[in-house]
Amino acid sequence: MNLKEIKEMINLMNENELVELELEKDGLKIRLKKTAGEIQQIVTAGSEAMATKLQLHKMDTKQAESQELIEINSPMVGTFYRAPSPESAPFVDIGSEIEPGQVICIIEAMKLMNEIKAEVKGRIKEILVENSHPVEFGQVLFRVEPR
């Protein structure tokens, strides 16, 4: 699967007002899910070779309007850390107020510590990953109530 094919899937979603698109082909599984005006991409290797599965879900506009929480997704594959060191306090906890540009976690990828910064102002409502656990590209890390 190449970038052109992924862009075509995104265009298909936009043209047909789809919220989610999932495709499994040759052991590669791709799921695109639109949340609060964004599209997140999750790619995982599957165990079933040559299986093709396509799921289309129509967008429920009432559901989209009622979504109040903003998801902060992992921009890369790596290991999630809530604090700068094992002895330090976490960057954020549930209920913490965050500002744009504030470091909210670290993702270690290939021995590099990447600070993940908030892009919105709000309050942390959910932390969806355990400290020192692996994360995938596009995986939801936090849910934030915008302010």
Image: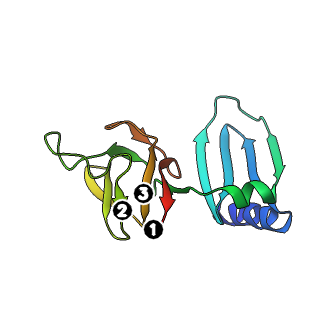
**Which residue lies under the disc numbered 3?**
123
Task: Name the spot of residue 17 as percent of width and height, x first.
Answer: 82, 63
Q: How crowded is mark 3: few (under 14 residues within 10 Å), some or many (20 or more)?
A: many
Q: Is residue 30 above or below residue 36?
A: above
Marks 1 and 2, the one that precedes in the sequence: 2
Q: Which residue is drawn at 46% across and 41% down?
A: 128
Task: Give me the disc on residue 98.
Answer: 2
- Which residue reaches farthest left? 87
In space, the residues marked 1 and 3 are separated at their CA atoms by 9 Å
In space, the residues marked 3 and 2 are separated at their CA atoms by 6 Å
Marks 3 and 2, the one that precedes in the sequence: 2
- Which residue reaches farthest top? 47
Q: What residue type is labelled 1?
A: Val
Q: What element carries label 1?
A: loop
**Decide: marks 3, 2 in contact (CB < 8 A)?**
yes
Residue 1 can be seen in this image: no
In space, the residues marked 1 and 2 are separated at their CA atoms by 7 Å
Q: Is mark 3 on a helix, strand or loop?
A: strand
Residue 9 placement, left or right of 110? right
Q: What residue type is labelled 2?
A: Ile
Q: Which residue is drawn at 30% across and 61% down?
A: 103
Q: What element carries label 2?
A: strand
**Decide: marks 1, 3 in contact (CB < 8 A)?**
no
**Decide: marks 1, 2 in contact (CB < 8 A)?**
yes
Task: Give me the disc on residue 120.
Answer: 1
